[in-house]
Amino acid sequence: MEQRLSLQKIVYIAFLTALVFVVTFFRIPLGESKVHLANGICLLAGLLMGPLAGGIAAGLGSALYDVFYYPSDLLSYLITFLTKFAMAWVCGMIAYGGGRKAAHHGWNIAAGVIGAWTYVALYMLKTYLYQRFIYGFPEDKVWLTVSAKFPASAINAVAALIVAPILYAALRPALEKAKLLDKIQP
């Protein structure tokens, strides 16, 4: 029984990883960055599977996208994995904290808000550190780049906050009815 549950969880992680990867391809350029709905799927992973499994799916799906889109930046893959993992992990920790099992819509929204803005903060920090210390740009140019990337990041966060709770609210009853929810939640 334990192996079967583990296999099911691995399959769900793989499915959500693939979903994050594919959704990331649908991007709209906005200034120095791009708008997409992949962050919404990252939050959905945290809501559906909890902090660890959801974080793995979010981090792997996003990092795999980077591997295909930016084929030579190993540090970027690791940072993407960690920041997207953190987004889903924070979301899952809040949604599942106190025995809630992501069953309380208000807590799920709060989890999404904090998870999404955790990612925005980490992405802005990554942008700052890359620009300042890896590329060696002067402070004023670094802040211009960070400022240019913030609007798209904020739009991605808001879009994720719309998409994730709606998808979760739609999927949860179906997964409960099929008796699958308990098999994928922590």
Image: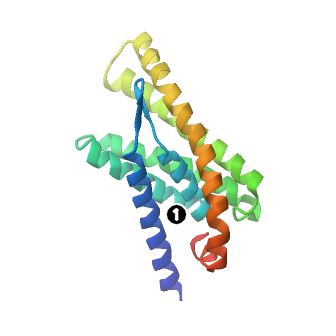
Observer able to see residue 127: yes
Say which quarter of the image contains residue 105. Answer: bottom right
Q: Amino acid at mark 1?
A: Ala
Q: Residue furthest left?
A: 72
Q: Is residue 52 left or right of residue 7?
A: right
The residue lying at 63 percent from left, 80 percent from top is: 179
For the residue pair 175 and 9, the one nearer the viewer reads as: 175
In the image, residue 173 sits, relative to residue 123, either above or below, namely below
Q: How many marks?
A: 1
Residue 106 percent coordinates (x, y): 77, 51
In the image, residue 110 sits, relative to residue 98, either above or below, namely above
The residue labelled by disc 1 is 53
Residue 166 percent coordinates (x, y): 64, 54
Q: Residue furthest bottom?
A: 1
Residue 61 percent coordinates (x, y): 40, 54
The residue lying at 49 percent from left, 84 percent from top is: 4
Quarter containing the C terminus: bottom right
* Scheme of image coloration: rainbow
Residue 133 percent coordinates (x, y): 36, 24
